[in-house]
Image (spheres, helix red, strand yellow):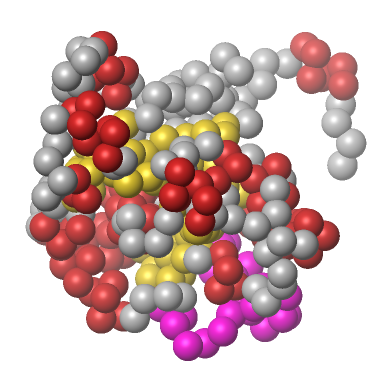
Amino acid sequence: MSLNIREAFEAQPQPIDYVLPNLAIGTVGAIVSPGGVGKSMLALQLAVQITCGVDLLKFGEYPTGLVAYLPVEDSATIIHHRLYALGKYLTTRQQQIVADKLLVEPLIGKCPNIFLPSWSNLINEISKNRRLIILDTLRRFHQEDENNSGAMSKVIGKLECIAADTGCSIIFLHHSNKGAATMGVGDIQQASRGSSVLVDNIRWQSYLAGMTTLEAKMYGISDGVRDQFVRFGINKANYGERAPDRWLQRHEGGVLRITALSSKSSKRLTKERTSAWSGADNDNW
């Protein structure tokens, strides 16, 4: 349906419905990080937040609703351990809300392929009436060459079709390339592994990066506990302003919680890390 230009000029537009900071409803985004940093737990925590509103990461308040999490790399037993750890931060009522609104369907060993009608139809059906569906990881949902821009355009295009058809946002988890991880630049857009299409054709990208030796020295963190700290940020936001990144600390069971670190060289950094996220009530972009 074509847009009524005259109406667009004169009528006040509806506020953008954000699922997460600057992630608009019905769009495709990604969480990129090296393996073993904690993106799967982060994804599960985001799913829990959207279902029951519990904000362990201090992202701010966003509308709650139905969510689906489809992990292909981890078994039901591993997911059980993560949910058990997360459950300690929830009341009995909150646990029941999550149980009612969150679908977790481990697909390990089932080789899902979004280009097969059976899988495409299933994901489309699951996405209906949900605010978010999380694919963990994208590589497990297709059999194409990640370095082929044409193939990756089709992959993202397929996800966009599902999002547009159902109104559900889709976040896929993706690995960063080895060079970015080795050089400690996992926070840049180009850290994503494979074709640049995987960044260019999506509307939102966030990252999770482990604390580097230099950062540990800056914040006075010993090597023995450095792996407990990870940095989260949004390095692409087409429908909102980018917000400052923030430090998260891994707790028992792998649960991530926001933490304030004081730089030995600049106290100003602490303020920047803990400043509020933009997006929920901000259309100035």
Give me the residue at 11% from left, 50% from top: 224
Range shown magenta: 105-128
* 246 versus 207 height, above or below: above
Give me the residue at 50% from left, 66% from top: 137
Give me the residue at 55% from left, 46% from top: 191
Name the residue nearer the viewer: 16 or 224: 224
* 199 versus 157 height, above or below: above
Name the residue nearer the viewer: 235 or 12: 235
Residue 109 visible to an observer of this rendering = yes
Would you say 51 lies left or right of 185 here? left
Residue 114 on the magenta span: yes
**Which corner quadrant holds the N terminus?**
top right
Q: Quadrant of residue 266?
A: top left
Residue 42 on the magenta span: no
Residue 44 visible to an observer of this rendering = no
Would you say 98 lies left or right of 74 here? left
* 54 versus 260 height, above or below: below
Q: Quadrant of residue 177?
A: bottom right
Name the residue nearer the viewer: 141 or 35: 35
Q: Looking at the picture, how far across and down is residue 62, in whole percent?
A: 39, 36
Outermost residue, bottom side: 109
Q: Looking at the picture, how far across and down is residue 141, in whole percent?
A: 60, 72
